[in-house]
Image (cartoon, rainbow, N blue to C red):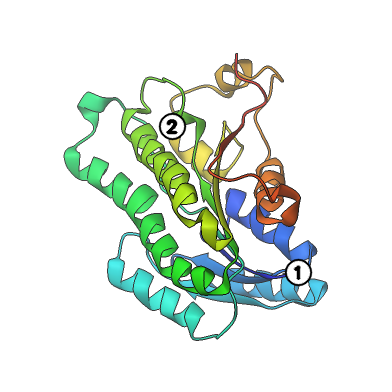
């Protein structure tokens, strides 16, 4: 089908996105923070099952030099890049007054500036190809008002605006840029950040469907935005939250 970069593909939503592309016959550059033999065994099995290649790429999102090195590793493969899924990010939940400026800078480095740089590098290939799709992982925290989401929500809101403005800029090159904004999804990130402070039933009650989302439900929308089935969708931030009350 094509070639896709998926950042943060070793767990949670990123892992579900990787699996969705794999079963549909896409070749994948699978990003993780650091080399992991268990992850490499896992992607080797997925690749073999689906008759594709999956190549691991490792770099820290907070390290500019590592980002450049990791992207060079991808470019050295001399393959077209049809889709970029900027999934990797950093969660955080605390009040504004309890959030040090250094933590806010870290959140913006990982949730905004890292995808910014990855997109900028990837566009060098996509513009020459005259085609491509970029899907950014946002959050409903960027759209709704919730105590404790001030800084995290702001970092994702910046990503939303980048998504919209960039779509207007590169659409003429046949490149679409969209974002998805999930509500609460049962992942390690949710367990480690939010469920320590907010009971699961409180999150479930905020959804009209009375439950949290599943990672594969987010992956389905990401995949849709990557394909020609969504060929006229551009510059959108799509909520996936079961209908918020």
Mark 2 Cα-neighbour bin, 10 Å: few <14, some 14–19, many ≥20: many
Sequence-wise first label, 2 or 1: 1
Query: Alpha carbon of mark 2 to alpha carbon of mark 1: how far?
Result: 32 Å
Residue at 44 percent across and 65 percent down: it is: 33
Pinpoint residue 161: horizontal percent, then vertical percent. Answer: 40, 40
Residue at 67%, 46% in the rendered image: 232
Residue under the image location 60 percent in, 74 percent down: 40
Residue 236: percent from left, percent from top: 55, 39
4 over 232 or under it: above or below: below
Q: Which mark is residue 1?
A: 1
Please tell me whether mark 2 or mark 1 is closer to you in this view: 1
The answer to whether 126 is drawn above or below residue 188 in the figure is: below
| Label 1 packing within 10 angstroms: few (<14), some (14-19), many (20+) | few
Please state if 143 lies on the left or on the right of 66 as rendered: right
Q: Residue 108, percent across and down?
A: 30, 46
Considering every residue shown, the one lying at the far left of the view is: 101
């Amino acid at each position: 089908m094509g070639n896709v970069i998926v950042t943060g593909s070793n767990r949670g939503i990123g892992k579900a996105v990787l699996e969705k592309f794999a079963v549909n016959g896409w070749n994948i550059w699978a990003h993780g923070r650091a080399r992991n033999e268990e992850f490499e065994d896992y992607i080797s099995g997925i690749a073999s099952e689906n008759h594709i290649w999956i190549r691991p790429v490792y770099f820290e999102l907070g390290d500019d030099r590592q980002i450049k090195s990791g992207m060079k590793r991808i470019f050295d493969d001399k393959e077209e890049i049809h889709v970029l899924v900027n999934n990797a990010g950093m969660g955080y939940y605390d009040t504004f007054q309890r959030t040090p400026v250094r933590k806010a800078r870290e959140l913006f480095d990982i949730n905004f500036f890292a995808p910014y740089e990855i997109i900028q590098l990837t566009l060098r290939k996509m513009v020459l190809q005259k085609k491509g799709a970029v899907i950014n992982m946002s959050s409903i925290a960027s759209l709704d008002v919730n105590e404790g989401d001030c800084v995290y929500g702001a970092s994702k809101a910046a990503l939303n605006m980048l998504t919209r403005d960039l779509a207007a800029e590169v659409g003429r090159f046949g490149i679409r840029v969209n974002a998805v904004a999930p509500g609460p999804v049962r992942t390690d990130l949710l367990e480690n950040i939010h469920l320590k402070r907010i009971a699961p039933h409180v999150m479930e009650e905020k959804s009209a469907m009375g439950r949290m989302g599943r990672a594969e439900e987010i992956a389905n929308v990401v995949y849709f935005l990557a394909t020609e089935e969504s060929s006229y969708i551009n510059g959108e931030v799509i909520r996936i939250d079961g209908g918020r009350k």
